[in-house]
Image: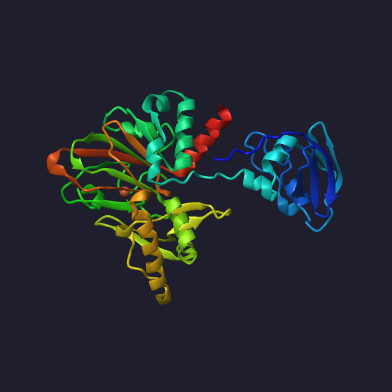
Amino acid sequence: MSESATISDGMISVEREGDLCVLNWTDGRKEGFHSLWLRDNCQCADCLHPQTRERLFDLMTLDPNSDLIDHLETQNGSLFVTWSDGHQSQFSERWLHEHAYGEDARQARREKPTLWTSEVKNSLPEINYEKVMSGDEGLLSFLDMLCDYGFALIRQTPTRDLEVTRVASRISFLRETNFGREFDVISKPNPNNVAYTALELQSHSDLPNWEVPPGTQFLHCLEFDAEGGESTLVDGFAAARQLQSMSPEDFDLLCQLRIPFRFHDSDWDIRRSATTLALDSFEELEEIRFHSALTAPLDIPSDQVLPFYRAYRALTEIIRKPENILKLKLRPGDLLVFNNRRALHGRAAFDPNTGPRHLQGCYVDNDDVMSKRRVLRRRL
Ligand SMILES: [Fe+2]
């Protein structure tokens, strides 16, 4: 995963090139900042609330067509700007470096996930419960693995009822859904979800029928004596990239075409249309929604139906390839944590007559996970 580069050398001068203030760093780099952008991001206490660090400055007070800058200079590692209305701004070299928006700087700040196949079983991202629970370093290591691989295993978690919620609460609030604050994955009579049977579960993401599907899922193995029932994980982003290289038009269609998802029982009817794959502004994969059981009858333009089925089948074939599937036989005390919007999960069928299989789960939103990681990084 990329880290933003540290400043190797200071800036030495600034010059104007049209709309841009161009800073020259001593290592030869140049970084352009628009004068309007600099004025909008003035760091003084009148423009930026000193406590909340929220913007007070009103962009609409400026005429963007006038020449905003009266004077520019660099001194002692800072950029000083005197604006044409007399206002003054100071920007530190570090702040400018951290907020530079040239292509190289933006690329250097990108998170690049480590994509994986079943081979990841030889070097599983795993950590001991005590480390996660007892100190910030352990929690941060766990969050780093989770963000990089899209999953991590916590070993030797005490097999206590609701321990899963205590671990998840190390990060933040739990995300409640129509399945409750926490849920027990166990074969039940009269199930409202195939997860609560002993049937095989093909790889899927949970709750794609929500506007915002839960981000991170925690599944804690409390009891497991049944035959079968191995857990499976597939890196949805790696699968999507394989599809892109085999069939770019199928990949593009799954990024563009919204399809309907729906969950309904006697108390709920939750529906959302969304694309199967979603990309961020760097064309990096951001999300996969994939759950055949919750895909509603397609109500998409007629001429898109067959292209969709073709693309969806191509992606499903990749997701079902044994070389893409990580198989894990969870043992009591194992706590599997994964990004539900990246890693697809499933399980083999099991025979409930051979012994119990009881997992307890809950969710935390990805915003909370990533926020916790940033705060810990800053602190440590
Ligand atoms: Fe599930």
Which residue is pictured at 18% across the width and 41% down the height?
227
Which residue is pictured at 32% across the width and 46% down the height?
232
Which residue is pictured at 47% across the width and 55% down the height?
241
Q: Point out the image quarter for the C terminus.
A: top right
Image coordinates for residue 111, horizontal then vertical, percent: 55, 44
Given residues 354 and 74, the one toward you in this image is 354
Q: Quadrant of residue 360?
A: top left
Image coordinates for residue 121, horizontal then vertical, percent: 37, 39
Numbered circles on residues, count: 0
Which residue is pictured at 42% across the width and 59% down the height?
276
Image coordinates for residue 238, horizontal then vertical, percent: 45, 51
Q: For the view shown, which residue lies furthest in the left direction? A: 353
Judge whether residue 175 can be spotted in this image: no
Left/right of residue 216 with respect to residue 10 in the rendered view: left
Q: Point out the image quarter for the N terminus.
A: top right
Image coordinates for residue 83, horizontal then vertical, percent: 83, 46
Given residues 4 and 318, the one toward you in this image is 318
